[in-house]
Image (tube, helix red, strand yellow):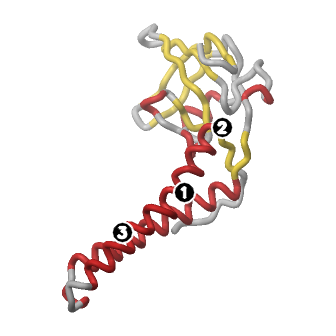
Amino acid sequence: MGEKNNGTVYLTRERLVELEAELRELKINGRAEIASKIAEARAHGDLSENAEYDAAKEAQEHLEIRIGKLEETLMRARVIESSELPNDKIYILSFVKLQDLKTGETTEYRLVSPEEADFDKNKISITSPFGKGLMGRVKGDLVFIRVPAGELKYKILEISREAF
C-alpha cells in the first residue's frame, strides 16, 4: 500500500464533508451491495471456477482499501479556513491570478492540499512542482517553474483569500 504518511492532512470544510459522506456511503451501501453480489455468486455453485465470485471478492477488496484510505485521511484531517491565513503571500487555500509571460494570458488557481487537487477546477496541489513554485511568493513576483514539459514563466498579478 506504499509508505505511510503520518502528517496532517489539511482540508477545507467542504472537502471534509464530502469525504465523510463518501465513507458513510461505502460502509453502508457499498458493503451491502458487495455482500449481495458475493451471496448471489455463491449460490451458483462451485467457487473454484466461478468468475462472478472472483469479481465480487476483488470488488470487495478494492472497496475495503478505499474505506481504509478514507478513514486514514479523516483521522489525520485538520480543517483549515482561508481566513486563518495571511494574505500577503501565497499559502495553501490562496487564490492566485497569474499572467503567462509567454502568451500574456491570465489564469486563476487555488492552492489546495493534494487530497483536494483538481486541475479541471483550477485547484493545484501545494505539493506539485507548480504549487511548490508558487508557495510563499508575493504579488509582482516573476515565477519560473520547471515542469516535465519545460519551464513555465508567470507574473503574480493578485493573491486573495476569496475567488476573483
Q: Is residue 67 left or right of residue 111?
A: left
What kind of element bears circle 2? loop
Whichever of callouts 1 and 2 sits on the residue coming sooner in the sequence is 2
Q: Which mark is residue 12?
A: 2
The local crowd at label 2, few if under 14, some if 14 to 19, many if 20 or more residues have their Cα within 10 Å, is some
Whichever of callouts 3 and 1 sits on the residue coming sooner in the sequence is 1
Q: CA distance from mark 1 to mark 2?
A: 17 Å
Q: CA distance from mark 3 to mark 1?
A: 16 Å
Residue 66, compared with residue 47, is above or below; it is above
Residue 2, x across and y down, in percent: 54, 66
Q: Nearer the viewer, residue 61 or 37?
A: 37
Query: Which residue: 51% across, 32% down?
Result: 146
What kind of element bears circle 1? helix
Q: CA distance from mark 2 to mark 3?
A: 30 Å
Residue 101, compared with residue 39, is above or below; it is above
Query: Which residue: 53% across, 31% down?
Result: 123
Q: Nearer the viewer, residue 3 or 20?
A: 20
Residue 50, x across and y down, in percent: 21, 83
Residue matched to label 3? 59
Q: Amino acid at mark 3?
A: Ala
Q: Amino acid at mark 1?
A: Leu
Whichever of callouts 2 and 3 sits on the residue coming sooner in the sequence is 2
Q: Amino acid at mark 2?
A: Thr
Residue matched to label 1? 23
The local crowd at label 1, few if under 14, some if 14 to 19, many if 20 or more residues have their Cα within 10 Å, is some
Residue 22, compared with residue 124, is above or below; it is below
